[in-house]
Each structure stands twice: as C-alpha cells, then as structure tokens.
Image: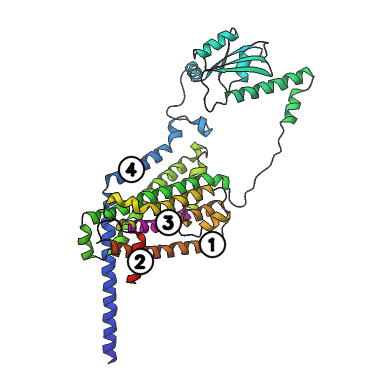
C-alpha cells in the first residue's frame, strides 16, 4: 500500500515537472520569436549600430580635431597645427569679430592698446570719425562700433542686435577697469598693491563627504529622459504588436496552441530584452569611449558620462522594473482594441501617468530629499526614476532602496497578472474599443 502511494506521488511530481517544463518551453518559444522580430527589424538594428558607432567615434574627437576651446587642453590632433605661423595668424584674424571705434578724447591712447584691452571681444580698428564708423556699421563692414566720449561714457552701434549679445557687457567691464586705473594714477596710488588687495579672495578647499548634487545633476537628467523615451517608444510597440495580431486574426491561431497569458509575458519580456540590448549598447559605447579618452576631454563631460557604478546598477534595477510595469499596461491596452488607430484612444491614461511622473521628477530633480521625491520613490508608477535620482543625488538608506524595489516588483507581478487577465479577455473580442472599466468589471465577475 505504501509503495503504491509513493509511486502515485512520484508520478504526480513528474507530471508537475513536465507541465512546468512545457510551460517554460512555450514561454521561451514566444520570447525567442519576439526577440528575433526585433533583431530582424532593420530600423532597430540600424539605429542601434549608428548610435553606438557615432557615440564611440565622438569620444575620439579631441584626438582628431583641435577642441582646446572646449576641453581647455591643447592636444596634438590630426587637423591641428600649421607649418606657416603667418597663415595661422591670418586665419585667426579672419575668424575674429571686427569692430570700429572712435575715441573722442583719446581715452584708449592708441589702437594697439585698444586691441590689448578688448582682445576677448574681437579686433578693434580706429575710425576716422563718428559718422564714418556709423556708415561702415550700417553697411555691415564691421560687426559693431563704439563711440567713446571718455572712460565713463560711450555709445554702442550695431546693425542687428542679437538676442544673446554680451559684447556691450564685456566692453563696459574693460572700460570700468580703465576708469579705476586712471583714478588710481591720478591720485598717486599704487595700482598693483590696490589690485592685489581689492581682488583678493579667500582660499578654501571643499571636502564633500557625501554626494555632489551639482556634479550628478546632468547625468540624472539624461537618464530620466532616457527611461521616459524607452517606455513610451517600446510600450507603444508592444501595444501595436498585440493589436496587429488581433486585427489580422492570427491571435485566433496562437491562443489554440499556447495560453494567452504566456503570449503577453513573452512579448513583454522580449521587449524588455530588446530595450536592455539597445539602450545598454548605446550607453556602454558612450561610457567606454569617454573612459578611454577621459584625459583628452580634460574631464569636461564628467557631469554627464562619469556615472558611478552604484547609480548605473540602481538605474538598471529600477529602470527595468519601471519598463516591465508599463510594458504590461501597454500590452493590456493593446488587447482592448481591434485596430491600431484606436490605440491612442485607450492608451491616453497610461501615457498621461507617464508624462506626469516625468515632469514631477524633473521638477523635483534639484530637491532629491524633498517630500515629493521621497513619496514618488516608493510609488510603483514613479519609483523607476525617482529612486535612482535619490540614490545619485540625495540621502537614502539601504532599507529604503530595498523596500522601494520590493514594492515595485510586487506591483509588476500584480499588474502582470491583471494585464494577462485583460489580454485573455480581450484577444477574441472585436469591434469597438473595450473600456478599461468594463474589462475590470468582467474580470471581477469571473473571479
């Protein structure tokens, strides 16, 4: 009798194992099919390859071109240098802004001194008179003109005023310094001693014991935008894929060979893998390329590309979680309609939530320890971006991170279960879009 019971239990265990193996095989079959559809998609492959090549190649720009004006470091590059110093000077002068000035009382003494004083603005040439200067500015032979009455009064002439023109401000700064210098000389005061004391600044070292929010701000900003774009773009693709299968009736064949929920899970997991492959490749190309050429860039892009390992890990954990959460929601949305043109009608609520979260997180980015960001870091609809921002810029304890991750992934399980129910209910229903309230009511009645 005991042996019969043992044999019966053994058979039941084997049947459960076979059932699980069959389910996993079917799920992996769907994942394999869906991921291959992404890989075979020319736009997906071409976009990924182009972005990887461009970002990696862009990291070598300081070694190819002279970017000393950006990096602050003069490096030997393929296109830097000149065999003829005179030609170099001529080209520099040709690319510099050209200004005229008329000095009524010889405040600047000479044209040579004027060019020394205003070298950061451009090349200065003395006009014969005020009218001649205005005429040449009007004819656009010069970018601008200055009529200098004395070291405290002047008139600035320009043909078209640009929206962002700091020329006048720079001119006033130099003229003000010249006025101070003339005053000191007139009162027999030591210019060097006065300048040393007047411009003296206290020296201090900043020792950051925690996190530098100003340094981390820009890469957090970029990562928030990145995950937002990925969720919107791939979420719509998942919803469209589900709707296409309904519209061409292929779903009727698929549901006879595999449970509908495995179709949805396969699509979502495949979409997540595609995101990881594409975004991971592009991000890796940028980070690796910059790390190789860090010295050539003189650390100028540290605020964007010098991302600590813990931030990358947290971005991966919460970013993947957030994508899964909304991917299931988009999959359910796709099952509610029969035509692709109807997707936006039912996806509006999901997209509205994503947009609100996006703007709230960006608005609170400068206050990572504020109450709004703290609340958002525990809500599954927003923790995918809010929590990694807090990890990068704010003060957050390990238990908070763990609790937030548990809430997020528990919510993914729930939304996945709910989306599977909606998907199974909606796949064989055609016609007008199904309202989400009606779908939930139907599920509640069936349960």
Identify whether 290 is placed above or below 74.
below
Sequence-earlier tag: 4 or 3 = 4
Which residue is most to the right?
188
Residue position for label 2? 441
Identify whether 320 is placed above or below 59.
below
Q: Nearer the viewer, mark 4 or mark 3?
A: 3
Sequence-earlier tag: 4 or 1 = 4
Secondary structure at numbered mark 1? helix
Secondary structure at numbered mark 4? helix
Sequence-earlier tag: 3 or 2 = 3
Residue 206 x %, y %? 65, 45
Sequence-earlier tag: 2 or 1 = 1
Q: CA distance from mark 1 to mark 3?
A: 17 Å
Image marks 4 and 1: residues in contact by CB distance under 8 Å: no
Q: Nearer the viewer, mark 2 or mark 4?
A: 2
Secondary structure at numbered mark 2? helix
Q: Is residue 74 visible?
A: no
The magenta segment is: 312-332
Instruction: Specify the label residue 400 is tagged with.
Output: 1
Q: Is residue 23 visible?
A: yes
Q: Is residue 219 left or right of residue 6?
A: right
Sequence-earlier tag: 1 or 3 = 3
Instruction: Specify the label residue 47 is tagged with.
Output: 4
Instruction: Specify the label residue 322 is tagged with.
Output: 3
Q: Nearer the viewer, residue 238 or 402?
A: 238
């Amino acid at each position: 009798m005991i042996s019969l019971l043992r044999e019966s239990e053994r058979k039941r265990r084997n049947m459960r194992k076979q059932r699980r193996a069959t389910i996993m095989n079917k799920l992996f079959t769907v994942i394999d099919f869906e991921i291959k559809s992404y890989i075979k998609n020319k736009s997906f492959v071409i976009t990924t390859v182009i972005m990887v090549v461009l970002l990696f190649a862009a990291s070598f720009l300081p070694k190819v071109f002279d970017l000393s004006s950006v990096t602050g470091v003069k490096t030997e590059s393929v296109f830097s240098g000149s065999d003829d110093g005179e030609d170099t000077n001529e080209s520099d002068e040709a690319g510099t802004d050209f200004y005229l000035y008329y000095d009524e009382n010889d405040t600047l003494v000479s044209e040579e001194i004027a060019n020394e004083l205003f070298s950061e603005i451009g090349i200065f040439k003395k006009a014969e008179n005020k009218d001649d200067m205005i005429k040449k500015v009007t004819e656009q032979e010069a970018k601008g003109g200055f009529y200098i009455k004395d070291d405290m009064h002047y008139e600035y002439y320009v043909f078209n005023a640009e929206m962002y023109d700091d020329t006048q401000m720079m001119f006033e700064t130099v003229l003000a310094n010249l006025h101070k210098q003339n005053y000191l000389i007139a009162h027999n005061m030591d210019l060097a001693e006065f300048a040393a004391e007047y411009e003296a600044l206290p020296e201090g070292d900043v020792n950051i014991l925690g996190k530098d929010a100003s340094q981390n701000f820009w890469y957090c900003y970029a990562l928030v935008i990145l995950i937002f774009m990925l969720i919107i773009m791939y979420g719509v693709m998942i919803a469209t894929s589900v709707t296409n299968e309904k519209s061409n009736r292929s779903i009727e064949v698929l549901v006879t060979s595999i449970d509908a929920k495995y179709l949805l899970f396969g699509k979502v997991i495949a979409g997540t893998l595609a995101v990881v492959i594409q975004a991971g490749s592009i991000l890796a190309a940028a980070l690796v390329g910059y790390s190789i050429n860090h010295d050539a860039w003189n650390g100028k892009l540290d605020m964007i590309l010098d991302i600590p390992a813990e931030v990358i890990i947290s971005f991966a954990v919460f970013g993947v979680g957030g994508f899964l959460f909304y991917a299931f929601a988009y999959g359910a949305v796709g099952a509610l309609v029969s035509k692709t043109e109807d997707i936006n009608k039912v996806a509006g609520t999901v997209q509205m939530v994503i947009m609100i979260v996006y703007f709230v997180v960006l608005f609170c980015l400068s206050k990572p320890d504020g109450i709004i960001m703290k609340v958002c870091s525990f809500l599954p609809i927003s923790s995918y971006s809010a929590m990694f921002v807090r990890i990068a810029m704010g003060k957050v304890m390990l238990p908070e991170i763990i609790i937030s991750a548990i809430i997020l992934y528990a919510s993914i399980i729930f939304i996945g279960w709910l989306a599977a129910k909606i998907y199974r209910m909606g796949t064989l229903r055609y016609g007008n879009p199904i309202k989400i309230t009606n779908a939930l009511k139907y599920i509640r009645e069936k349960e």
